[in-house]
Image (cartoon, rainbow, N blue to C red):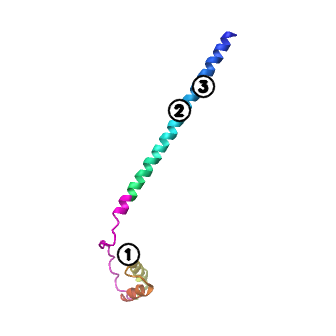
Amino acid sequence: MALLHKFFNNQAQQLVQLKTANNILEYHAMESQGDTTDAATKAMSLVVQAILSNIPTGGHSPRRAKAAKPESFNGSRDKAKEFIQSICITVMMQLDTFSDKRMKILYGLSFM
């Protein structure tokens, strides 16, 4: 009987040790997760700051890509879709130039 008592006592002690070790591991895992989240947040913040610092302000005009001028439209149905697409591309690339519908229409008409 004393042997069984000693066996169960050892088992209980080992169980307590395992629970303690488990709690410590869980704590370190949660702490590590928090560190990873903090590192990711800091990295994202640095990327955003880098992007924002490279956006030109009103001090100077940035270089802009220019679309090729559309070919003059001769009324051909085969070329109509291509012509409309080239006008749309130019307008989308230069939104500040084509501020209203009237300017867009006049631009398209200038190639007819």
Q: Percent x, y for residue 73?
A: 37, 86
Q: Quadrant of residue 12?
A: top right
Q: CA distance from mark 2 to mark 3?
A: 12 Å
Q: Position of residue 42 (x, y in %)?
A: 42, 51
In the rendered image, residue 21 lying in the magenta stretch gets the answer no
At a point 45% along the width and 45% down the height, the residue shown is 36
SS type, badge 3: helix
Where 51 falls versus 26 (above or below)? Answer: below
Range of residues picked out in magenta: 49-74
Q: Nearer the viewer, residue 77 or 1?
A: 1
Q: Amino acid at mark 3?
A: Val
Residue that extends furthest to the top in the rendered view of this protein: 2
Disc on the earlier residue, 1 or 2? 2
In the image, residue 61 lies in the stretch drawn in magenta: yes
Q: Position of residue 18 (x, y in %)?
A: 57, 27
Query: Residue 93, which numbered label?
Result: 1
Within 10 Å of disc 3 (Cα), the crowding (few <14, some 14-19, many 20+) is few
| The label number, if any, that marks residue 24 in the structure image | 2
Looking at the rendered structure, the kind of residue marked 1 is Met
Dominant secondary structure (helix, strand or loop) of the stretch shown in magenta: loop
Packing grade of label 1 (10 A; few <14, some 14-19, many >=20) is: some
Which residue in the structure is indicated by mark 3? Answer: 16
Element type at marker 1? helix
- Determine which quarter of the picture holds residue 10: top right
Q: Residues within 10 Å of mark 2 (few under 14, many from 20)?
A: few
> The residue under label 2 is which amino acid type?
Ile
Numbered mark located on residue 44 in the image: none
